[in-house]
Image: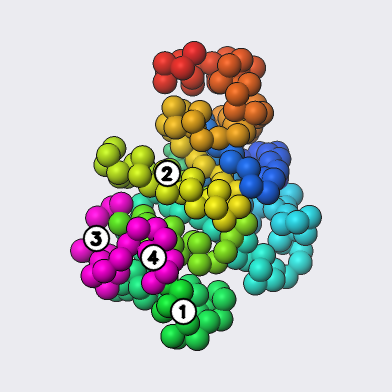
Amino acid sequence: MSLTYGKHAPAVVQDVSLTVDAGEKIAIVGESGSGKSTLARALTGILRPSEGAVKVHGRPWETVKRTDAERRSVQMIFQDPYSSLNPTMTPLATVSEAYKVVLGYSREKARKAAKQGLEDVGLTGHVIERLPKGLSGGQLQRVSIARALACEPEVLIADEATASLDVSVQAQIINLIINLVESHQMALVMISHDLHLTRSVADRVVVMRNGTIVEAGPAINIFADPATEYTRELLASASLH
Ligand SMILES: Nc1ncnc2c1ncn2[C@@H]1O[C@H](COP(=O)(O)OP(=O)(O)OP(=O)(O)O)[C@@H](O)[C@H]1O
Ligand SMILES: [Mg+2]
């Protein structure tokens, strides 16, 4: 698959092929501008490939009209939780809305499911009735996670999902994501500059550079014996090789 921004623009991601298996945790790593977020946008269907296709259970998204189930099957958590949430909606309203729109729940059923969903990400009490500007970064990211989970996705994509948070909060949010991914048997595609984190979380690692995948394989192999000089340098910059 290749990806461009604009019709006649050059491809920023070129001839990339990636399969996400059920329940696996994949990390996409690589220097800034290598195309990680662009690839993630294509995986969620926000960006349409200029060449090739994203397939869900073997069905290409571009040629077949997407079913609601396919649309919900891949959900994303963004780097900046504030800008990805509606500033005029409380956590309870945001997550209720997802249950109403995506699962077709009634108002009351959606509210109940949202309260449970927010509790599952550690939010209870008055915070769920506050507007986003009154919440911390960690709390906002918990709301984003609850909203994504309301869609009951098969794949969760986390693009630098903890990068904007205080270091002390990052581990809590990562642990929350891992626990939820495992308990809901979802696959995780994690994009991160934190290679220590990547090593502790990922089953498989995809290394990107200049819009292409330079190597991919089991995390254990990539960290122990990188195949390319680029990956070696990337690991060395994190004092990992
Ligand atoms: N909306 C856009 N319009 C045009 N070009 C873009 C757009 N978003 C990204 N690009 C370009 O596409 C290339 C890949 O960017 P991308 O954001 O995918 O990189 P990244 O690997 O996610 O980087 P980072 O680690 O800094 O987040 C870059 O050259 C970038 O300038
Ligand atoms: Mg990015």
Mark 4 residue type: Leu
Q: Residue at x 46, y 37 (%)?
A: 192
Query: Residue at the location (50% across, 62% down)?
Result: 149
Q: Which mark is residue 118?
A: 4
Residue 110 marker: 1
- Considering only order in the chain, which callout, 2 or 1, is on the residue closer to the N terminus? 1
* Color theme of the render: rainbow
Q: Nearer the viewer, mark 2 or mark 3?
A: 2
Residue placed under numbered mark 3 in the picture: 135
Q: Main secondary structure of the magenta part?
A: helix
Closer to the N terminus: mark 4 or mark 3?
4
Which secondary structure, mark 4?
Answer: helix
Queried whether the magenta region covers residue 22, the answer comes back as: no
Query: How far, Cα to Cα, is label 1 from label 2?
Result: 26 Å
Residue 189 lies in quadrant: top right
**In the image, which is nearer the foreground, mark 1 or mark 3?**
1
Looking at the image, tell me whether mark 4 or mark 2 is earlier in sequence order.
4
